[in-house]
Amino acid sequence: MCGIAGAYHWPDGKAVVERLTDVLAHRGPDGEGRYGHSAGAGEVHLGHRRLAIIDLTGTGAQPMVSGGLALTYNGELYNAPELRAELAGHGVRFRGTSDTEVVLEAWRRWGTDCLPRLRGMFAFGVFDERTGELVLARDQLGIKPLFLLRRGEGLVFASELKALAAVTGGSLQVDHGALVASLLYYWVPDSRCAFREAEKLPPGSWLRCRPDGRVERGRFWNLKDVAAEGRERALAGEQPDLAAVVEESTRRHLVSDVPVATFLSGGLDSSYLTALAARHQAGISAYTIGFRAEDARFEAMPDDLRYARQVAARFGVELHEIEIAPQVLDLLPRMTYHLDEPIGDPAAINTFLICSAAREAGVKVMLSGMGADELFAGYRKHLANLIALRYQRVPGPLRRGVSAAVDRLPVATARRGYRSVRFAKRFLSFADLPEETAFRRSYTMYDRDELLALVDPDLAGTVQDVLDEHADVYRDNELDDFVNRMCLADSRMFLPGLNLAYTDRSSMAASTEVRVPYVDVEVVRAAFAVPGDRKIVGRQGKAALKQAATTILPREIVYRPKGLFSAPLRAWMSRDLAPLVREVVNDGELVRAGILRRDALARLVAADAAGQHDYSKHLWHVLTLEYWYRGATSGSAPSALLTGAGTEEIR
């Protein structure tokens, strides 16, 4: 795992790439390299920061230059042994054992046709000295990031947006459409970028820059097509052996020349991966988190820690427990800087602190259960949307009575929160809506009217554009299976836009690689070959994966209530962060700039404080958005990065 950067026909490209790679130093503390070439209409420069995982010797150093090709690569290739053997059969002689060299030689032989053959996570830039062409590519599911910016015939690219912002001297303008989208979802979807000129290379695609200024784009893999093929397999009665597919993926993800550990929350996904990893790698360790007792009680959080201990003991895994009692005021600006864009999921803090602890213990690679919920319908919203279809058959007067009664219930008192009431209020916010609209509302932060009331009236058109784009993504498929339509929408938006994004940035902030065995092309193919009525059975979400997991896990773990990889936001908002919330509402940059309306924010704060509604997630995201906006408009990094604030919170 690494940081990559480059400049193509860009003024002062050498200095620009030096600055880009300096900003990305946290992604690769084990080495750095640069490459330059002058030909034709302009110069080309590539940069690399290395986190050495496979082939720790100099033969794995980058940018890798051989036979007229120069490659800067970020990722892991899990079918490298098979491709290496095939290429060797064609006469290729390899100098080392890195997967980088496999990618370079695969490109030499097959060009863009090699891309669908790569099984792993990757983003790279490859320059051909003979043709003068630069090609950028990103993996099938968007696990690894790649940002780019074009001006005229020039282009710069990097693994992180902050690097591009740094080399453009603060000239990038905030995209208000991206801010509106982040308010709607609490993340910025992959189709948008927080700065106007910049963009994200879409998952499963490539971009070619030619010396004459032409730019060509192509797509080598499309999740929508994979889902359609899976539906055809399901209708034909072809059922994948999920247990075998997941185990094979996990085994491949363990290949490393440095120590590997796992995230272990005690939930199904991480427990399943940890058990499989322990089967194939004796002595593997795992990391889990806990919170201050008073915070967990106020949030009404489940006791995940005891399940994590049970799994670790059963499979002989050394478990490291981290209590998170963070100085949130220190961590908030630090994490906002590292996340690149306004992302309001506090799980980013958990990931950063776990990876920091693992790194201090000498672990460079972590396995995560990310992606299983999206692919196998494991979120509460998936089951809730099916229940909503049945709920709509209840007579209208009775539904209105239930809604009125639940609305009067508090979500919290001064001493404790009521989780079931929070869930009920959330359910009733979308339960009466049509199927498609209900699903989209089940995970967005606001409905249309609420969002319009929150932002500057001049952004009303932008609000509608964002909502229309959201609807278009959901409708862009031919599936006749509601559950798999939900899974497809989540895998196209929620997974790359939020979960994979914060996982990459938070882990790399701690110079640690996180691998995601569920987000593997073969697991994805298998997942969409499972009919929706096998993913949700009765009141059991993720039923097919649970059935597969019973081959190795005890039923007590497999069928336990779903846990949360989150944080006690209500406790933080009412205690640690209450003064900051007041400051942002009364005199924050977003309010002063007219982007957010003070009166609407004040109503959210008052309703949350009264305990009638849970707006803690909304307010947390407003804080992340505020800190991101301050950094984006000032062009300066937060002081927390300079002082190392936040490291003492790992206990």
Image: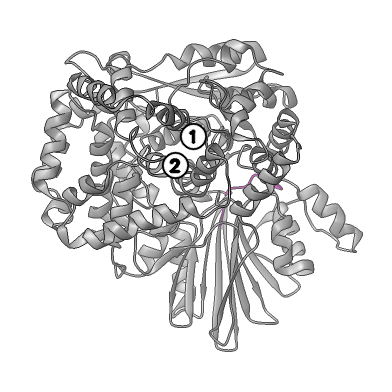
Q: Which residue is mark 1?
A: 355
Horizontal side of residue 276 vs 591, given as left or right: right
Quarter of the view holding residue 502? top left
Q: What's the CA distance linking mark 2 and mark 1? A: 8 Å
SS label for mark 1 = helix
Tell me, yes or no, if residue 275 can be seen here: no
Q: Would you place residue 428 above or below residue 644 in this image? A: above
Q: Nearer the viewer, residue 481 or 192?
A: 481
Q: Nearer the viewer, residue 255 or 223?
A: 223
Q: Nearer the viewer, residue 454 or 159?
A: 454
Q: Of callouts 2 and 1, which one flags the residue occurring earlier in the amino acid sequence? A: 1
Which residue: 28% across, 26% down?
A: 425
**Label 2 Cα neighbours within 10 Å, binned few <14 / some 14-19 / many ≥20:** many
Q: Which residue is mark 2?
A: 506
**Label 1 Cα neighbours within 10 Å, binned few <14 / some 14-19 / many ≥20:** many
Residue type (three-letter) at the residue carrying disc 2: Ser
